[in-house]
Image (cartoon, helix red, strand yellow):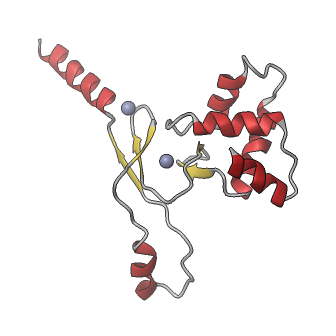
């Protein structure tokens, strides 16, 4: 949190209670929530905060690199307070997004230099599959069908 207030001071940005609330919420979860999810989760404590305010707070947090925005396709964005590069895996059935820990693809930024004349700045690695819950429910369905 110390880092957080410092960054805002340096960038001369206003540290509003809403921005703090959105950042705190993101730090407290590994679920990579969407703006709507954040909005709903904060509604009880911040009943006057609108969805637009949540979007604006997220935009500011992303611009100062405190939060990472994940494009999960079809115009859907998820947010992550863990900004160091890490791969993600998304469930194709329920769209939950999880971190993949313990492996890094930062070396890809170097590897790709032989294949492009771009200056490579970053990469995002996504994997897709079925989460354990969806995998289990698919197996249950199969069992019921064979009965
Ligand atoms: Zn799932
Ligand atoms: Zn993540």
- Residue 134 in the image, given as x and y percentages of width and height: 32, 28
Q: Residue furthest front?
A: 2
- What residue appears at the point 83 percent right and 55 percent down from the top-left corner? 9
Marker count (numbered): 0
Q: Residue furthest top?
A: 147
Q: Quadrant of residue 43?
A: top right
Q: Is residue 110 left or right of residue 13?
A: left
Q: Is residue 103 left or right of residue 112?
A: left
- Residue 130 in the image, given as x and y percentages of width and height: 32, 37
Which image quarter is the N terminus in?
A: top right
The relative height of residue 51 versus residue 145 in the rendered view (above or below) is below
Which image quarter is the C terminus in?
A: top left
The relative height of residue 57 versus residue 36 in the rendered view (above or below) is below
The relative height of residue 53 versus residue 49 in the rendered view (above or below) is below
- What residue appears at the point 57 percent right and 51 percent down from the top-left corner? 71
- What residue appears at the point 50 percent right and 35 percent down from the top-left corner? 31
Foreground: 28 or 77?
A: 28
- What residue appears at the point 54 percent right and 34 percent down from the top-left corner? 29
- Residue 59 in the image, given as x and y percentages of width and height: 74, 49
Q: Is residue 88 left or right of residue 65?
A: left
Q: Quadrant of residue 54?
A: top right
């Amino acid at each position: 949190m110390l880092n957080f207030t410092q960054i805002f001071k340096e960038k001369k940005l206003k540290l509003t209670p809403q921005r703090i609330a959105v950042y705190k919420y993101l730090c407290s979860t590994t679920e990579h929530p969407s703006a709507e999810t954040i909005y709903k989760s904060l509604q009880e404590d911040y009943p006057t905060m609108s969805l637009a305010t949540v979007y604006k707070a997220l935009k500011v947090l992303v611009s100062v690199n405190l939060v990472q925005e994940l494009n999960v396709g079809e115009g859907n964005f998820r947010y992550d307070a863990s900004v160091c590069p890490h791969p993600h895996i998304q469930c194709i059935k329920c769209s939950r997004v999880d971190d993949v820990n313990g492996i890094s693809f930062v070396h890809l930024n170097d590897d790709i230099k032989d294949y492009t004349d771009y200056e490579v700045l970053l990469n995002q690695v996504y994997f897709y599959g079925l989460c354990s819950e969806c995998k289990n429910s698919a197996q249950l369905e199969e069992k019921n069908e064979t009965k």
